Image (cartoon, rainbow, N blue to C red):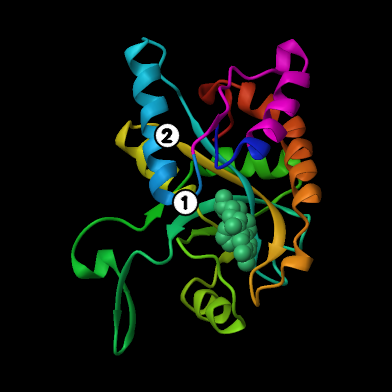
């Protein structure tokens, strides 16, 4: 489990530690830092350390708070990513933004296992959709509309998912992203953030997700 900051890690760990032993997943919670680069470095380090220990991870979960696109993901709601997309990895041109894939290299999308996404969303009552990874928090209606226009399936944005997913992919491990919405994506309004509520929602989500994450992948329905 990779979160950006300690408050998110503790919100998830509270739920996991409280799960009954038979439903408690063997899960390490690590705060890997804010932003895609720190998230990739921290997650890759954790994956490599576990592999060298002879106990490789079978799943990586990127979890934390995030901004919700309105009206798809209201503040306080939960989102499970069915696609994890690097929204600002590319080039600006006179004709608009070009993702790196159109420049001929890299990747901008990671796709979590569909059955796991369905099971996780059903367990915690989350919406599913694209979760964008950005290096700059959206702060204007114009940028929010631009991102929604380029990514019609986007329900949320955050800053780590794609970095976590890149590290997981490098280790051949599946990835999941779960976000509790702390603020709307749009004009900057710090008074509208509900970080405490979102952290409580994250704990609630992982209370209900624990049995899903404790299930061996081959026990899942397709
Ligand atoms: O200063 C601001 O206007 C501002 C607005 C929203 C979030 C921030 C942060 O610095 C939080 C970054 C942190 O939390 C995640 N997060 C939460 N909301 C968003 C968002 O709307 N867009 C992107 N990231 C968000 C993010 O994953 C970071 O870990 C500042």
Visible residue check, residue 53: yes
Of marks 1 and 2, the one in the foreground: 1
Q: Position of residue 189 (x, y in %)?
A: 71, 72
Region in magenta: 9-32
Where's residue 131, x and y in %?
A: 54, 57
**Label ID, residue 140:** none
Alpha-carbon span between mark 1 and mark 2? 12 Å
Residue matched to label 2: 43
Question: How many marks do you count on the picture?
Answer: 2
Furthest-left residue in view? Answer: 104
Q: Residues within 10 Å of mark 1 (few under 14, many from 20)?
A: many
Q: Quadrant where the C terminus lies?
A: top right
The residue located at (68%, 27%) in the rendering is: 13
Q: Is residue 129 visible?
A: no
Residue at 68%, 31% (x, y): give it: 10
Dividing the image into 4 quarters, which one contains the N terminus?
top right
Among numbered discs 1 and 2, the one appearing first in the sequence: 1
Quarter assignment of residue 185:
bottom right
Query: Which disc is residue 35 wearing?
Result: 1
Q: Is residue 124 left or right of residue 142?
A: right
Q: Position of residue 42 (x, y in %)?
A: 42, 35
Quarter where residue 142 is shown: bottom right
Q: Nearer the viewer, residue 46 or 156?
A: 46
Classify mark 1 as within 8 Å of ligand 1 or not, answering yes or no. Answer: yes
């Amino acid at each position: 489990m990779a979160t950006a900051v300690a408050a998110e890690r503790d919100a998830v760990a509270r739920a996991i530690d409280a799960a009954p032993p038979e439903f408690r997943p063997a899960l390490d919670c690590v705060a890997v830092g804010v932003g895609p680069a720190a998230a990739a470095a921290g997650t890759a380090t954790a994956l490599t350390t576990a592999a060298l220990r002879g106990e490789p991870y079978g799943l990586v979960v990127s979890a934390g708070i995030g901004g919700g696109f309105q009206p798809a993901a209201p503040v306080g709601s939960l989102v499970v990513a069915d696609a994890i997309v690097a929204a600002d990895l590319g080039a600006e041109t006179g004709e608009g933004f070009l993702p790196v894939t159109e420049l001929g290299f890299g990747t901008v999308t990671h796709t979590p296992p569909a059955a796991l996404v369905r099971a996780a969303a059903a367990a915690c009552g989350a919406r599913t959709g694209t979760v964008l990874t950005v290096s700059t928090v959206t702060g204007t209606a114009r940028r929010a509309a631009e991102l929604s226009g380029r990514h019609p399936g986007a329900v949320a944005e955050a800053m780590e998912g794609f970095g976590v997913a890149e590290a997981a992919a490098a280790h051949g491990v599946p990835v999941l992203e779960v976000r509790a919405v702390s603020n709307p994506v749009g004009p900057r309004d710090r008074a509208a953030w509900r970080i405490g509520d979102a952290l409580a929602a994250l704990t609630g989500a992982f209370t209900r997700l624990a049995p899903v994450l404790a299930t061996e992948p081959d026990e899942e329905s397709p």
